[in-house]
Image: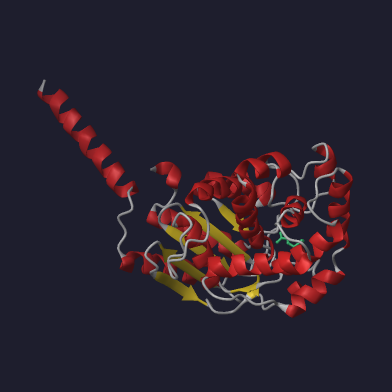
Amino acid sequence: MKTHKNIKFFVGIVLFLAVVLNAATYSPEQVQRVVNEAYTKYKGDMGGKNADYIKALARVDSKIFGIVLVDKKGNIYKAGDVKSRVSIQSISKVFTLALVMSERGSNFVQKKIGVNATGLAFNSIIAIELHGGSASNPFVNAGAIQTTSWVKAKESKERWVKISANMSAFAGRKLTLNDEVYDSELNDNKRNQAIAKLLDAYGRMGSNPLEATTVYTRQCSMNVSAKDLAVMSATIANHGINPLTKQRVINAKYTPKIMAVMATAGLYDNAGDWLYDTGLPAKSGVGGGIIAVVPGEFGIGVVSPPLDSYGNSVRAQLAIKYIVKKLHLNPLTK
Ligand code: GLN
């Protein structure tokens, strides 16, 4: 009988510790220490390669490596090169999706664009054909160009003004264009134009396909630092309120929808492995940035240009995985 009681007591202690260890029990000092550790651990890892299908991206300094966490109160934890700016690229797709969702609702996005994974590369043309003319989701190039085309605007200029103002509100400062990347990508843009024209043939575009592709290219060429990315991501984590400016940028009812698409397709055809390892909604860009959202707690932004074969930053993935593990941030364990 006594042994039975002892076992019960022991099991109770183990369960209690499991809950406590999994709960968010980190102090600000711990968070900063773990961010520093992630930086030191992966600083010298030069695996991967800058994107080169857009020529200007191949010229970006591969050594840039910065990690920033922003919590819901606006506290900032950082390590490394958190000021250098790279082009936002595909991470911009998250914020234009947010804009279109605000303007047209989440059902529109689900029905007109889709929210399923393609299992194929981000710039796949065959994925469109395989899915009956659907882009599948707003984070592959097809779905992103389509999303841009559905921003309510009378003409191109108005579309661009709205998209750039929206991204700036998420970042809490006026973002500016990386002209070198923009010019370069405009010249390396034939594949995206083909994608947009194919979608247009299926009746899926909200505006002229070439116009939408140009605005999309511009949105991908916005310059951001690791800090900007962390603030943008923290705005999603904080239910749509920018934790630095306190501005409401998107209705709280849409942030779970955005995070769901990030979890499904944020790291493209590697999104399953990413979710398995971290449990976090995230989004990568070929400029070398990754954002990850710890719902209700942190936004993470990391910049490091060398990419793996999927087009995801090697060091950014390693750093985020390390931080998630050390601080027990995987929401699926809660
Ligand atoms: N602008 C890039 C493109 O259209 C974005 C791709 C990315 O970051 N994965 O190819």
Decide which of 177, 274 is in the foreground and name it: 177
Q: Residue furthest left?
A: 2
**At x 46% / y 60%, what residue is drawn?**
241
Looking at the picture, how far across and down is residue 312, in whole percent? 65, 59
- Ligand 1 visible in quadrant: bottom right
Q: How many marks?
A: 0
Is residue 296 left or right of 157 when viewed as pictured? left
Looking at the picture, how far across and down is residue 228, in whole percent? 54, 71
Looking at the picture, how far across and down is residue 163, in whole percent? 66, 65
Residue 139's place in the image compared with 65, above or below, is above
Choose top left, top right, bottom left or bottom right for residue 6.
top left
Image quadrant holding the N terminus, namely top left
Image quadrant holding the C terminus, namely top left
**At x 85% / y 67%, what residue is drawn?**
188
Residue 217's place in the image compared with 94, above or below, is below
**At x 76% / y 79%, what residue is drawn?**
180
Looking at the picture, how far across and down is residue 249, in whole percent? 52, 61
